[in-house]
Amino acid sequence: MEAVQEPHSGPQANEDAEDFDKFWANAQRRQISLKNVMGVDVVLPPMLPLIFQAEYRRMKNASADDEKAVGRLVGLLFGQDAYQRWREAGMDLEQFSTLLLWGIANCSGNPISLGEAREQQEKAKQEKLAELKAAAEGGEPPKKAKGK
């Protein structure tokens, strides 16, 4: 396996090579803001941070009462203390899941409104309820539409 060279090292540095850092510094990446989330305005990062996926997996594998894992994940999108502030302000599970879906979608380059995020959450909830009902009745769960 070849060793990674230090930045800009080596006699073979190609002057015509594209500069990754310069490219991203000049890239137009939109900042998305949301006003008055339980009294606090938030600004999303322009894209999901690379560490988000690892933190998401860690959260899914954590115990149900691991608030630190949830807080770390939420902090990557909405700021370090956002989860704690929202809990203390009385945010409910529907509001939280809608906001999280909205944040992930927008940071992933799929801009949606809060209303659209809530509709998606409601649809997912209804599908899950239909699956549970079918399982309880011994039937087959409904088929999901392709591409949905």
Image (cartoon, rainbow, N blue to C red):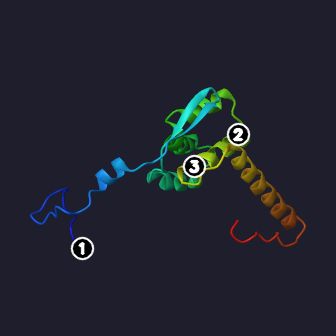
Q: Write down the residue under mark 1.
A: 1
Give the image location of residue 137, x and y in percent.
90, 67
Amino acid residing under circle 3:
Asn
Point out which mark residue 106 bears. Answer: 3
User: Left or right: where does residue 89 sit relative to residue 1?
Assistant: right
Q: Judge depth for marks 2 and 1 and give the one in front.
A: 2
Q: Write down the residue under mark 2.
A: 95
Give the image location of residue 33, x and y in percent.
55, 37
How dense is the environment of label 1, judged by Cα within 10 Å: few (below 14), some, or many (20 and up)?
few
The first of marks 2 and 1 along the sequence is 1
The first of marks 2 and 3 along the sequence is 2
Q: Secondary structure at mark 3?
A: helix
Marks 2 and 1, how far apart at CA: 48 Å
The first of marks 3 and 1 along the sequence is 1
* Above or below for 29 versus 79: below
* Above or below for 54 versus 14: above
* Above or below for 37 versus 22: above
User: Left or right: where does residue 107 sit relative to residue 137?
Assistant: left
Q: Judge depth for marks 3 and 1 and give the one in front.
A: 3
Marks 2 and 3, how far apart at CA: 16 Å
Quadrant in which the C terminus is drawn:
bottom right
Residue drawn 36% across and 51% down?
A: 24
| Residue in the foreground of this view, choosing between 38 and 137 | 38
Quadrant in which the N terminus is drawn:
bottom left
Give the image location of residue 116, x and y in percent.
71, 49
Residue drawn 58% across and 28% down?
A: 40
User: Left or right: where does residue 33 sit relative to residue 25?
Assistant: right
